Amino acid sequence: MSDPTNLALLALGLPLLATILAAVMGTCSTLAKWAHLPVVTAFAGSAILALLVLSKVMQATGSEVAFLSTAQTWFHAGNLQVDFQITVDPLSALMLMTVTFVGTWIAVFSVGYMHDDPGYARYFSLMALFVFSMCLLILASDLLLLVAGWEGVGLCSYLLIGYYYAKPSAAAAARKAFLVTRLGDVGMILGIFLFWQAGGYHTNFDKLFAHITANPPDSVTLTTACLLLFCGAIGKSAQFPLYVWLPDAMEGPTPVSALIHAATMVTAGVYLLARAMPLFVLSPDAQIVVALIGGFTAILSAFIALAQHDLKRVLAYSTVSQLGYMFMALGAGGPVSANLVVTAAIFHVFTHAFFKALLFLSSGSVMHAMGNVIDMRKFGGLRTLMPVTHITFLCGAAALAGFPLLSGFWSKDLIIDMVYQASEHGGSHATLYGLVFLTALVTAFLTAFYTFRAYFLTFWGELRTPPEAGHHAQESPLGLLAPLIVLAFGAVLAGITVEPFAHGFSNLLVKAPSVVLANSVLHVEAEATHPHFDFALAGISTLLALSGMALAWWHYRTGIETVPAALKSVYRLSENKLYVDEIFNGMFVKPAEWLAVLSRLCDGLLDGVARVVSFIPRLIGALLKPLQNGLVQFYALGMVLGLAVFLTVVVVRTSQ
Amino acid sequence: MLPNSEQFSALLSTLSADLVAFLPELILAGGITLLLFLRLFPQLCRVHSGFVAAGVVALALTTLLGNGHVTTNADWEPGAFTGLLRLDLFSQFLRGLLLLFTLLLLLLCDQTGIPDRDDSADFCVLLLGGTLGLMLMTSANHLLMVFIGLEMASLPSYALAGFLKGQRTGSEAALKYVVYGAASAGVTLYGISLLTAVFGTGNLVTVTQGLGHMIADSESVPLLPMAGLCFLFVGFGFKLAAVPFQFWLPDVFEGAAAEVSAFLSVASKAAAVGLTARVLLLLQEANPESVRLAETLGIALAVVATITATWGNLAALTQTNLKRMLGYSTIAHAGYMLMALSTLRKDGMAAVLVYLVMYLVMNLGAFAVVAVLRNRTGAETIAACRGLIARSPAVGVSLTIFLASLLGLPPLGGFVGKFLVFSAVYDAGQAYAVAGSPTLEWVYSLLLGVGIVNTVVSAGYYLAVLRSAGLDEAEATDASGHALPLGEPWGVAVYLVGLSIVLLILGLVWNPLITLATSAIR
Amino acid sequence: MVEFGFPAFLVLSAFLFACGLTCLATKRNAIGILMGVELILNAANLNFVAAARFVPTFRLEGQVFAVLVIVLAAAEAAVALAIFLNFYNNHATVNVENATDLKG
């Protein structure tokens, strides 16, 4: 099989098959507890296939590498032609590999974590559907097919976040996630409409990009369409102001959080922007907005993460913050060549997938041992109790904090470098990019601080366990630890083996068609632009990371949180998430409620009108009733009269 | 006219090819004989005749599919058997549809057990006989075959309508059906006699070409052929239950068993639509350029379609019996199909074919749910649906899907059908405007509006059932107030869920179907 | 002996047809209705045989039509009578005015 699209289709199909199998197994109580088998097997199979696909893509030569499956018409209406077709190019191959690989280990972890849960089969079936939707989103050659995957991801996230649906908070979180991301999706659909109109009625990526870059619409349309498309990414990838769903989303089972944060959902927005890079580089205004939103989200959520008590919540805000980094990188595209920013963003997606999955699964392991308690005030000093989890969490935390030579260090450094370069060549937006650059540096410091605060609070100081854990709180079983160990290796090594010296990503991504096109729009010679390693910047960010960690050590090494009096107000601000939820509540929810009351009044009025209007058909229907009186002669008379009418018409028409 | 010897030998040479193309019908006929003979041997009484019949239909279906697209007898007359039948892709499509439906219906009957063991053989014979007649209708290329097909389809249907022998309503339904059916057959035959007398032959191609030229070319059309055409369409209108020939349908549907109603509602309708579409297509092919055909026939059909859809939907609003409501919904759907037929354009006909496929699945499903309700609760009223989703998720959710599809909600098959029909009507308006007839543009725009308003009205009764099934408390509860399970056999649940899944798939992937329908119309 | 033309037969059959329709719409006895149907069928049949006589190309076809129609009419009558009998079993009458259980 020389054509990797067949392999990719298989990698796409396996999770779908697993979904169905797991769902069917769920109907039978004896089979239900084996529901993980098809799912884990399918994920592992997909991961191996994805690796094969990646190797095929790496072997392919030429300045542009893309394999397209044969297009099957999905539907066709007027000038809207949508094909079912998948694209295997460096971008999709890398994402596919990341998603399936990390997904596999999360599924393995889930086997131990979710055992004896009554909804075991439902859980695994949905996991598989989640990964399938994400793979569809990644492989789609068509905007609308991507939307299909996008909606699938949204649906599955709703179902999985609300997995414990009997718990009101879980149901509310699920609803919040669905509705908030839906807000962004509305924008995205509008953006797609605009591009469809401006792009010669194409929804196929290649055709659309080719058309738009050849005949760019006026800058207002373009910027509007780009920003509307970005709205979708803001919702799915939890950027300001729509990030509010993500921290609540940990109401779902912990492995689901790992899946959402690391692999399947939040990276969708980053991927969308990376794929649509040729459109975004055409509009510098849209790009600076992307970078600014990314920067603002990064620092805002890093600040909120400083004082959270819930371990998973700290991690959730760190995800929002890291996603902000990715958007900063993507927003730098334009001043900096496209292949570099896409490399930086996707590289960060890749390393982040490892260390964030690791951190979530480690915190899941902690939660498992602590009897489902996750409040850091209630436990501490766990390093002697859970040595393996301690080490793996430390690996993940160090990677997230940007400790030198670990994976997060390289990818974050690359992003900071991108933003720095953008501030040097940013043209009219140079100052703004400079601001983003400063934000990135400050966020790096905050990240190191809050990550290690969480680490010290959990693992250092005297051993404390909550009463829920009982007296036999102990290290998790091997089934849970194995994925942690594998992912820990990934978190440590995933960076240095790829970038910035081996150029594993940049050499590949420079061949992705959309990147090539974006570069040609920017008139950039792709060969000349490998990411280089800037020792001065690396030095600064190392210093910031180390000082953040040192500060955390100095303050939290006892494992007990004390707040200096001078910082109380700031602490309170962070603890209460900058009152963003409250502000939103006041700004949007309350007015919406008033509006609802007002609408209710109008509704009553309109309802009356509607009742009257809808009564009319019913009335006529009732009038027809006596005509169907069941009398044979009456029916016959009706038909004969009908016949007579037709005959009269014929006679009249023919005698004219 | 007798064929001369040359033509006769040509005929003989194509006979074997014709017989191969006709094999599905021959298999059905053989199956009917087999079923009748089985009763002679008491030892064989244990053989379940439903399964034998299903096997026969399955065999016929595979033969049909295996035939590929056989078109026979290009040399002498277009059409098989000296031009009596036309076994082209169009008839292939509809015959396949009919066989598929009969197969599904037999499987349903096996689950619901409506013909009891003693009557099963009779029921199956009637069903297969009716199917055979309907298949002849869809492939008829001669007015004689049209009539024979109509009668062969009708006679077993009359008997089927009264199959539940001890029931007052059943016998009343059969009485009404046979009286009006026979009368409309007579009217059709009278129309045929006028047409054949004018054109000197019953060959459908010759007749339609003659008619088409008359309508298109001459200023005033002679009365006799037009009256003949009018009578012919009255007969078709009866089968389709177009207003004002719809009176019989609700009564018959209410009185007959749900399975029989499903047969009348889907198979009978599919064949009637197919036959009408064939005649209209031939008329249109006789003078493809003219808008006069649309100005005479198209407008008349559009008016009938409007009244039919509106009547069906309005009358359905006040129904309390589920089967009767579905009867009125059948009338409304006939109206939608007539809208597409009234365009007199190929894409309209293709839209109708796709619509029929969707209609087959969703209407069969809806009647199957009625049959289950009748078996488990003894009632066929909308009230019997109360709390259905709580009582049986499989049946309740399937009913939801079927009714939502009948209403035309995406992403279900019914939406696709309705969408295609409406877009065909819209396109027709545009095309006729280009061809220089603003009247027609106006007519079709109005027709489109009527269709959309009707869809909105139809929500009134479909959603009422769904509300009852989903939100109302079940009447049958156990001591603690929980809804009693419906207790349907698992085979029925699998059957219904399977149909819903098919409907969902058809609603998502419909392009192959359109391609098939378009190639069938050519 | 007067030779009647084709139009005369057409008029006669139209008259028969109208009689049939009237019979259909007015008779209360199911058998009477069936007779009306037979009248209609025979009106058509009259057309067929007349056309076979007067339209040269239709000579053979018209007769085939007529014969087949007779057969089918017989079959139809048989089924209809069986159904009437069934109705009689349930209602003890063949008066169609009693068939009003189904309405609305």
Image (cartoon, coloured by chain):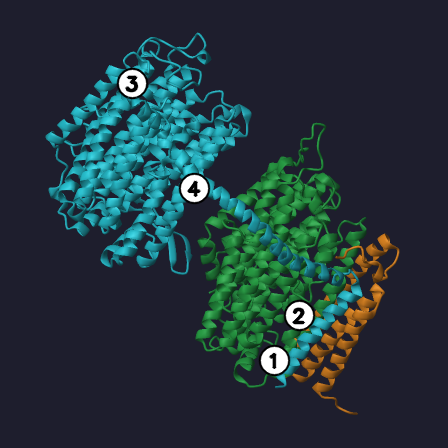
Chain colours: A cyan, B green, C orange
**Which residue is identified by label 2?**
B234
Q: Mark 3 lies on which chain?
A: A
Horizontal and vertical percent position of residue B283:
54, 73
Instruction: For marks 4 and 3, give the one nearer the viewer.
Output: 3
CB within 8 Å, label 3 to label 2: no
**Secondary structure type for disc 2:** helix
Identify the image quadrant of the C terminus of chain A.
bottom right
The residue at which mark 3 appears reads as A564
Chain holding disc 4 = A
Give the number of the disc on residue A64: none
Of badges 2 and 1, nearer the viewer stands 2
Q: What distance separates the C-alpha of mark 4 from that of mark 1?
A: 76 Å
**What type is the residue that disc 3 sits on?**
Pro
In the rendered picture of this protein, how many numbered marks are placed on residues? 4
> Residue B129 or A54: which is nearer the viewer?
A54
Residue B275 shown left or right of residue A571 in the figure: right
